[in-house]
Amino acid sequence: MLSADRENGLPGDVSVMPAARESAVLERQAEWHRRLVDSAPDVQLQTLVEIGRHSNVLGVSDLVIRLAGSRDDSVRAAAAQTLESSVQPSQVELPALAALLSDRADGEISYWAATLLGRLGQEAVDATPALCDCLTNSSFLPARERAVWALQNIGAAASDSIPALRAVSEVAPARLQLLCREAISKIGTSVHLVAKRAA
């Protein structure tokens, strides 16, 4: 059985065409999407557990992040576990993830949005302004720290974030100051390397 088939829970029959496998994955993702949006907490919990049995699950990031802010403690915990172990963001989800950074009602939501944007690396460059806003305006320290991590993962493409990182590095709690300084150094180094390669 191919490892990709194992990850997606599909039969390992090599006679199954790639298009058929892709179709099955898309159907399963659509079903998960429906159950996460339209269901009672017990169905959402069951769906999160099911998603957690897979790896590199795409297409449900923003929904699972929203459930990480659920009032139901079991759903909230399962969503966090699923985000930690199974869910991967896609470029298509970037606008939704960037919008979730500004959630002021629940810091866990902005924390997870920053985490998934960080996993996108350079592909999340368009979220740089939203990450800077989270860094400077969030009242949830872990979300601010995770925004710094995401900016650092974006690298040289996030060079516009350096002024915000500098400003925060002067007034934030000690750990966040340190993280900002490290990010400035790494982003600056990346900018110099890119400039050197271009020359």
Image: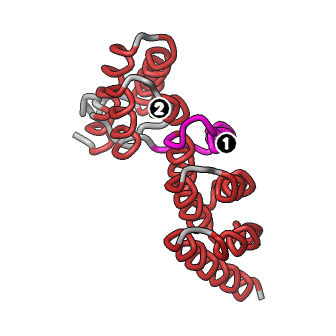
**The N terminus lies in which quarter of the figure?**
top left
How is the protein colored in the picture?
secondary structure
- At x 77%, y 89%, the residue is 199
Identify the amino acid type marked 1: Ser
Expressed as whole percent of the image width and height from the top left, the position of residue 51 reads 35, 30
Q: Where is residue 98 in the image (x, y as percent from the top left)?
A: 66, 44
SS at badge 1:
loop
Residue 22's place in the image compared with 199, above or below, is above
Crowding at mark 2 (Cα within 10 Å: few <14, some 14-19, many 20+): many
Answer whether residue 64 is magenta in the image. no
Span of residues in magenta: 88-108
Circle 1 sits on which residue?
102
Q: In the image, what residue type sits under mark 2?
A: Val
- Residue 147 appears in which quarter of the rendering? bottom right
Q: Earlier in the sequence, mark 1 or mark 2?
A: 2
Front-most of residues 129 and 72: 72
Residue at the spot 66% in from the left edge and 85% down from the top edge? 193
Tell me which residue sits at (67%, 81%) in the image: 188
Give the class, few, some or many, for how many residues have Cα within 10 Å of label 1's Cα (few <14, many ≥20).
some
Judge left or right: residue 193 versus residue 45: right
> Mark 2: which secondary structure?
helix
Report x, y in % for residue 70.
45, 26
For residue 115, above or below residue 31: below
| Residue found 33% across the figure and 14% down from its top | 42
Indicate yes or no whether the magenta region holds residue 105: yes
Residue matched to label 2? 64
Residue 74 x/y as whole percent:
31, 26
